[in-house]
Amino acid sequence: MKLEREHVRILDDSSLQAFYHNASNPCPVLWHYHPEYEIVYLPSGSGQRRIGQHHGRYEDGELLLLGPNVPHLSYDYGQGPDFEEFVVQFPKELLSADMLTRPELAPVAELLKRADSGLVFGAEVRQVVGPQLQQLLTLRPWERLLGLLRILHELASTPAYTELEAGPPISGPLPAAQQRLNRVLALLEKQLSQVVSVSELAAEASLTVPAFCRFFKRMTQRTVTEFVNENRVQHACQLLLTTPSITDAAYASGFQNLSYFNRIFRRQMGESPSAYRRRVAVI
């Protein structure tokens, strides 16, 4: 299974990303890594856990904290129709080195150091922290940040965890092809709420348009259109929980046509935007 770098897109008005996955909306990458910290909460279910060099199983749900660039297999891999998970991702820069020297955050600093190994928390911690993670999806950005700090403090205060000994995170210079892709993804992120110019993306990669399209498909396993639509729908999922109008969420996430947005959203999420908002809002 090919190791891929996941490109995490965090909204401009927020310092972190919180989202919900289920069987109809699987994670777009399988064996992957990213430079952000990640908290994963599975309310129930069992399955395989593959984090770096660690291979194991979880039973009756999971609560996990991963450090930056730790390779891991998506939890929805091989799962059935009842699968669901809540994920929070935040960059290393969210808590600066200076902030982490403050006495109030000393336990959190130690927690984040241990996260490079991969940390799995006990059932009692999961029952307390899990609902707090769910609530992050519906909070305003500043409330979401405060909520994350409370969660990190809760995780830092418990001895009920297991280090997975996942091995060293990905380090060193990226291969040339990945560096080229990262430049394209950075440009694409700026264009996501606008009309995406494939010729401009190709120029950023120093390739002709046909060569760029082949390169992009080889690196991401998706066409540019598929990749853009997936990211726009994920953006829309966050906006639907804070924006009163579905139309506003559609256009703010880059869709130029409401009927096209509804069709793509339903294809990717397995339900309409209004049904998604009603369901997630009461989770």
Image (tube, rainbow, N blue to C red):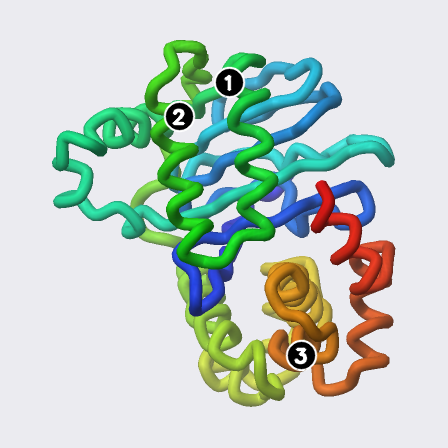
Among the two numbered marks 1 and 2 on one chain, the one whose residue lies closer to the N terminus = 1
- Mark 1 vs mark 3: which is more N-terminal? 1
Write down the residue under mark 3.
Answer: 248
In the rendered view, would you say 207 is above or below 66? below
Residues at circles 1 and 3 in contact by the CB criterion of under 8 Å: no
Q: Amino acid at mark 3?
A: Asp
CA neighbours of label 2 inside 10 A, class few (<14), some (14 to 19), many (20+)? some
Which element carries disc 1, helix, strand or loop? helix
Which numbered disc flags the more N-terminal residue, 3 or 2?
Answer: 2
Residue drawn at (64%, 42%) of the image: 30
Question: Can you give x and y, in whole percent of width and height, for residue 71 in the image?
Answer: 49, 36
Circle 1 is placed at which residue position? 125
Disc 3 element: helix
Rendered residue at 30%/46% (across/down): 172
Identify the residue under disc 2.
154
Residue at left offset 86%, top offset 71%? 263
Side of 274 relative to 122 (left or right): right
Q: Are marks 1 and 2 in contact (CB under 8 Å)?
A: yes
Left/right placement of residue 269 relative to residue 48 reads: right
Spatial separation of the CA atoms under disc 1 and disc 2: 8 Å
Q: Name which residue lies at 60% across and 63% down.
A: 242
The residue closer to the viewer here, 253 or 210, is 253
Query: Would you say the residues marked 3 and 2 are in contact, meaning their CB atoms lie under 8 Å apart?
Result: no
Number of other residues with Cα within 10 Å of mark 3, as a class: few under 14, some 14 to 19, many 20 or more = some
Q: Amino acid at mark 1?
A: Val
